[in-house]
Image (cartoon, rainbow, N blue to C red):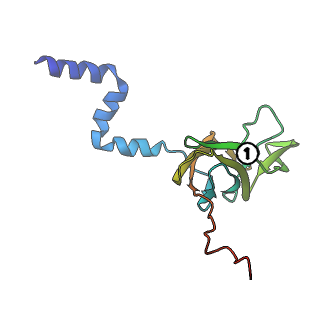
Amino acid sequence: MNWRRTLALVLLMGCPTLAGFARVGWQDIGTLAKAKTPVQRVTAMPPQVVGIPPGGKVTTDLAFQVKPGFHINSNKPGSDFLLPTVVTLSPPANIVVGGLEYPPGREQSFPFSSDEKLSVYTGDFTVTALLSAAKNMPTGRFRVHGFLTYQACDDRACYPPTKLPISFEVDIARAATRTRRDLPHPHN
């Protein structure tokens, strides 16, 4: 037996993960990875392109929808034991997220905790982001990436925390300047 075959057998016998791949076949690795993709119980409705002039500030609404039959903890769920819903944004250089404003949650009690009201989001909710661009920001389109981190529950159980990828475009454009032709004639 050559040394490569011996090494392969030792690795496969000593490593259950590799042995599992050998059993299901290398072509099935993608299928196994997809099976571990978390089930999303919230959808993001991406905003239109956000326009900001260099040196300017703007707010944009990030809209989300919790699927029927589920709720997620609000940003301030009311208990230290509950995971808050959080938006994390990673803008490109020279664009700054100046703050995020979360809506208040709806106070609701559930069969698994009927003696206490929890602050939750159901249906549609919107997080407002304040964005600003540096004065020296070049013009063009840039993409802001991020995540909505949340924990979804139904009336019987809570599910593992989930990260929902979000992204949107920011258009940096110079403010339109008036040309001499656009200005009113001083004698009119």
Q: Quadrant of the N terminus?
A: top left
Q: Give the residue type at disc 1.
A: Leu
Q: Is residue 25 left or right of residue 148?
A: left
Residue placed at 73% from the left, 52% from the top? 128
The residue at which mark 1 appears reads as 100
Q: Is residue 142 above or below residue 159?
A: below
Residue placed at 25% from the left, 18% from the top? 10
Q: Is residue 134 left or right of residue 79?
A: left
Which x, y percent locates residue 56? Answer: 68, 51
Answer whether residue 161 is visible to the viewer in this image. Answer: yes
Quarter where residue 73 is shown: top right
Q: Is residue 179 above or below residue 76?
A: below
- Residue neighbourhood size for the residue with mark 1, other residues' Cα within 10 Å, grouped as few (<14), some (14–19), many (≥20): some
Q: Quadrant of the C terminus?
A: bottom right
Quarter where residue 8 is shown: top left
Answer whether residue 46 is visible to the viewer in this image. Answer: no
Which x, y percent locates residue 60? Answer: 69, 55
Which x, y percent locates residue 182? Answer: 64, 74
